[in-house]
Image (cartoon, coloured by chain):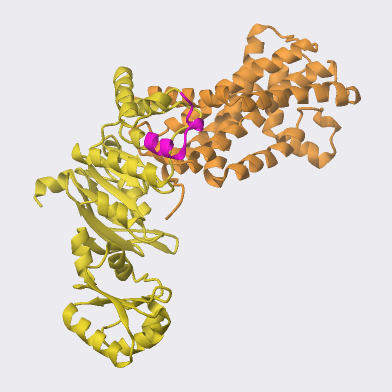
Chain colours: A yellow, B orange
Amino acid sequence: MSRENLSEGISVQGVSKSFGSIIALDDVNLEVTKGTVTALLGPNGAGKTTLIRILTTLLFPDSGTAIVSGYDAVRDATRLRSIIGLAGQNAAVDENLTGRENLELVGRLYHVSKSEAKARTNRLLTKFELTEFADRRVKTYSGGMRRRLDLAASLVGNPKILFLDEPTAGLDPRSRLALWSVIKELVEEGVTMLLTTQYLEEADHLADRMVILDHGKVIAEGTSDELKSRVGGGVLELRLGEPRELQTALNAISGLTNGGVQSDGESGVITIPVVDGTSILVSAIRRLDEVGIKVSGIELRKPTLDEAFLSLTGQGRGTDALKEVV
Amino acid sequence: MAFSTTDVLLMTKRNLLRYIRIRELLVFSTIQPVMFVLLFAFVFGGAITTPGVSYIDYLIPGILIQAVVFGSNQTGVGLAEDLSKGMIDRFRSLPMARGAVLAGRTLSDTVRNVFVVLLMLGVGGLIGFRFQNGLPAAVGAIFIAVLFGMAFSWISAALGLFVKDVEAVQTAGFIWVFPIIFASSLYVPVETMPEPLRFFAQLNPITVAVDSVRGLALGAPFSPPIIPALIWGFGIIAIFMPLSIYRYLRISKEIA
């Protein structure tokens, strides 16, 4: 990562922010290279939105520095605002204005000329397939249309850096796919992007790199593959012939690994994170055979991003309960 | 700040479109003061004695102040609405002039107040109200009313930004305004009130504003306390404008 790239991207160093006794961000460091997409992942309240707010000058950090495209988010806030675009959690568009009026207003507030604001508005309305509804009031728009208009509004200023805070939250699957394809186009045009999401699939699909926040700290970062491999070599999945023998099976294989075993009583599937997959596979089958449990399916595979995320944030469904049993 | 005028005008236009497009808002915010005129002029008016002038002449200057002060509540409500819908976040992330959102809001409410004041004068004219002190004084009376509307808009802006919840702002805005509107010389001469209340009513800025508008509109025997009215009007703006801007620059919809 060259120095030049860094100054054009995002660089967060030691940023902390508290609200009263709540620590929202705790010494966060983050680098986003110019022209790449980084996804901020994390459970609710992890500090994702707070970080976006600091980078878009809406909040001041208590300590640390945030540099966006060479501008300090506190000292150069005014200049920074003219080169960023923000689409926040709720579609921030004026219901009483038409789609066209909304975009033209934002364009004028970026201080581009009237004619340029009109030209950009027309381009964006076409790009987001809103031309047909351009002169209707936003009040009549569907949720998906509002989101598209909101995203269009964040682009009127031709931003170098785009911040999207949960861009597809609350959208139906079809609108989500439509929004994804627009975001991908923007990336191809070279926009640097930082987006937050709760959907791992979305991060996997859109982002080059991921940063996982938990309780205001960065707990992991890297590409999707890097995060998956951080969990361990792989995952051993055993499907029991008789799901009701689950407890016996869990007892039989206990001690094989250092926990992290997940199981589903209904399907009779046991998932074990493994480093040396083949030797554990052999031991597990032998032990199950000794107690007379039939296995109907065995799979040794790489972990999914979901498993990586749950393991990294320690939010495995039922994992804690099982640790006591296993 | 080179673009501030444009930014303020853009925001003013945006807010005025809201009044024009939400018809209910315009209709009800207009009907309410008209109702007060008719109610006081014809229901209570007969029982209220006013020195030297008809009750309708006495009442209309007060109604101008009441209409702009009640109407100013919309400033805070509008800001709370923008806040809850994330509009304030969007505006704050844009390179626009720092005070433009608030200035545009209070300016558009002032434009609306001018409209409401003229409307009230029209309704008053229909039931017999006349300016009796010449044109310059009449313009002065309208100026004082509009100035107080603007001053109360800035109070309402601060209230909206501190309270944040739309419904709470709506209610809170009326709770504190009612006592100062009624415990003043707006509907009845303060001399008719019992001692402690009269003391409060005489200090009340609403009394100062109403007495100024009334004195300018009707002339003798009323003498308008113009200087105190201007001090109150501009003084309120001098305190609540910076307070609102300070709050605006630090506000955020939610913390997480």
Residue B159 as seen in the image, left or right of residue A232 = right
Q: Which residues are magenta?
A: A136-150
Q: Depth check: B92 or A301 in front?
A: A301
| Location of residue B35 with respect to A153 vertically, above or below | above
Q: Is residue B224 visible?
A: no
User: Residue at (36%, 45%) from the top-left corner?
Assistant: A176
In the image shown, does B145 or A42 lie closer to the viewer? A42
Residue lying at 72% horizontally and 33% vertically, measured from the top left = B181
Does the magenta run of residues contain B22? no
Q: Quadrant of the N terminus of chain B?
A: top left
Number of numbered callouts drawn: 0
Q: Main secondary structure of the magenta part?
A: helix
Q: Residue A282: give x, y in percent of width and height.
A: 20, 84
Relative to B195, is B22 on the left or the right? left
- The outermost residue toward the top is B134
Q: Quadrant of residue A79?
A: top left
Residue name at image x 74 percent, y 15 percent = B123
- Residue B144 lies, in percent from the top left, at 62, 21
Q: Which quadrant, please, contains the C terminus of chain B?
A: bottom left
Outermost residue toward the bottom?
A290
Between B57 and A147, the one lying in front of the other is A147
- Image position, residue B132 (x, y; %): 74, 9
Q: Is residue A323 visible?
A: yes
Judged from this view, the residue extending furthest toward the right is: B47
Q: Position of residue A163 (x, y in %)?
A: 30, 44
Residue B210 lies, with reference to residue A24, above or below; the image says above
Q: Quadrant of residue A72?
A: top left
Residue farthest left in this picture: A2
